Image (spheres, rainbow, N blue to C red):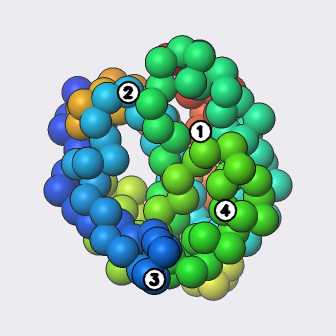
Amino acid sequence: MTITAGDTMPQGQLLRVGEAGPETVDLADLMQGKVALFGLPGAFTGTCTNAHMPSFVRHADMFRTKGVLRIVCITVNDPFVAKAWADQTGATEAGIEVMADADGSVTKALGLDFTAPPAGLFDRCKRFAALVEDGVVKAIDVEDSPGACTVSAGEALLEKV
C-alpha cells in the first residue's frame, strides 16, 4: 500500500557516508520536526540530475525560511554513489541530505517501488515529494511517470509548506 497524507512514516534504516565510512541512519530520527522529503529513481539519471535535485537545491533556503528543518532525498543506490551525486549536484553545499536506500527496503515500506527493465531500473523509488512533520506525512505527491518532474518538484512542495 502506498503511503498517503495522514500516515505515519514506516520504520527503516538508510545509509550515508560518514567520517569512518558507511553509517546507518534511522528514518524516524530523520523525520523529526518539519521535513521536506523527496525520493527519486536514481542518482546520475537524467531527470533526477537535471530537474528534480536542482529544484530542491534552488529552493533550499526558502524551505528553511518556512520552518523546514531538514531536506532529505532518498535514492536506491549505495551510499558512495549517493554521496558523490550529492557533491556533484550541489546538494551537499545546499544542506540537502542524500540518503541511500541501498536495499530498497524503505522504498518498499513506503509502497513507492517500481521496476522499469527497458531503462535498466530494477526495484527503484518512484519520484515523489512529501512534507513530513514529526514522522507524520502531511502532504505527498507521486509522479505518474519516472521521467516526469512536476508535482514532485521543489517548487510544488514549497507551496504546501
Coordinates of residue 138 in the picture (x, y in percent): 33, 24
The amino acid type, in three-letter code, at marker 1 is Ser
Label located before the other in sequence (2 or 4): 2
The disc placed on residue 34 is 2
Residue bearing mark 3:
21
**Residue underneath mark 1:** 152
Residue 2 visible (yes or no): no
What amino acid is at disc 4? Ala
Q: For numbered disc 3, what is the local secondary structure?
A: strand
In the picture as drawn, the residue positioned furthest to the right comes out as 50
Rounded to the nearest whole Å, what is the CA distance between mark 1 and mark 2?
17 Å
Which residue lies under the disc numbered 4?
86
Residue at 69 percent across and 68 percent down: it is 85
Position in image of residue 78 (x %, y %): 50, 81
Task: Please tell me which residue lies in front, 114 or 81.
Answer: 81
Q: Amino acid at mark 2?
A: Lys
Amino acid carrying mark 3 in the image = Gly
Tell me how far mark 2 sits from mark 3, CA to CA.
28 Å
Residue 53 spot, x, y in % from top left:
69, 50
Please state which of the two labelled residues, at mark 1 or mark 2, is closer to the viewer: 2
- Res. 50 visible in picture: yes
Q: Quadrant of residue 48?
A: bottom right
In percent of the image, x 66 and y 55: which residue is there?
92
Give the alpha-carbon distance from disc 3 to disc 1, as whole Å. Answer: 31 Å
